[in-house]
Image (cartoon, rainbow, N blue to C red):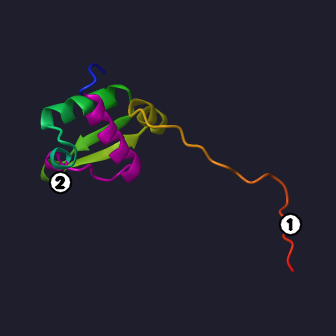
Amino acid sequence: MSGHRLQPAVTAIAVEALSRGEGAALPTNVEFLSRHGLGAGTMQRALAALRASDAVVTSSRGHLGRFIERVGVAQCWQLAALPPVRMLLPPGGPQEIDAL
């Protein structure tokens, strides 16, 4: 992936793919333009970069739109430059509850 101008498009597509999941439709080029100011050519280059990295694979269904066939979560996260997710998990073992 070359150029920092492509990064906002890659991030926008990756976030949409991660949040919508496989089988869902991506927003249209018009929606990407109105939400993110990204043109159709930029979106096509970003989709090609995501596909080449096996992060997001889509298929076009004509007037129905572009659908997500596969999402590589780790690849999407990395290419979108999203921050790490931190979680606090309870300790293992039985949980005891004291009640008054």
Residue sticking out furthest to the front:
100
- Front in this rendered view, residue 19 or 24: 19
Q: Are marks 2 and 1 in contact (CB under 8 Å)?
A: no
User: Would you say residue 87 is visible in this rendering?
Assistant: yes
Q: Amino acid at mark 2?
A: Leu
Residue 64 - label: 2
Report which residue position mark 1 lands on: 96
Query: Helix, strand or loop at disc 1?
Result: loop
Tell us which disc is closer to us: 2 or 1.
Answer: 1
Image point 67% across, 49% down: which residue?
88
Q: Amino acid at mark 1?
A: Glu
Image point 32% across, 45% down: which residue?
68
Q: Which residues are magenta?
A: 6-31
Residue 14 lies, in percent from the top left, at 35, 40
Eyeballing the image, is 69 above or below 97? above
- Front in this rendered view, residue 18 or 23: 18
Residue 53 lies, in percent from the top left, at 37, 26
Residue 59 lies, in percent from the top left, at 25, 42
Image point 87% across, 72% down: which residue?
98
Quarter of the image containing the C terminus?
Answer: bottom right
Quarter of the image containing the N terminus?
Answer: top left
Residue sticking out furthest to the bottom:
100
User: Would you say residue 21 is visible in this rendering?
Assistant: no
Eyeballing the image, is 86 above or below 74? below
Rendering quarter of residue 86: top right
- Front in this rendered view, residue 7 or 45: 7
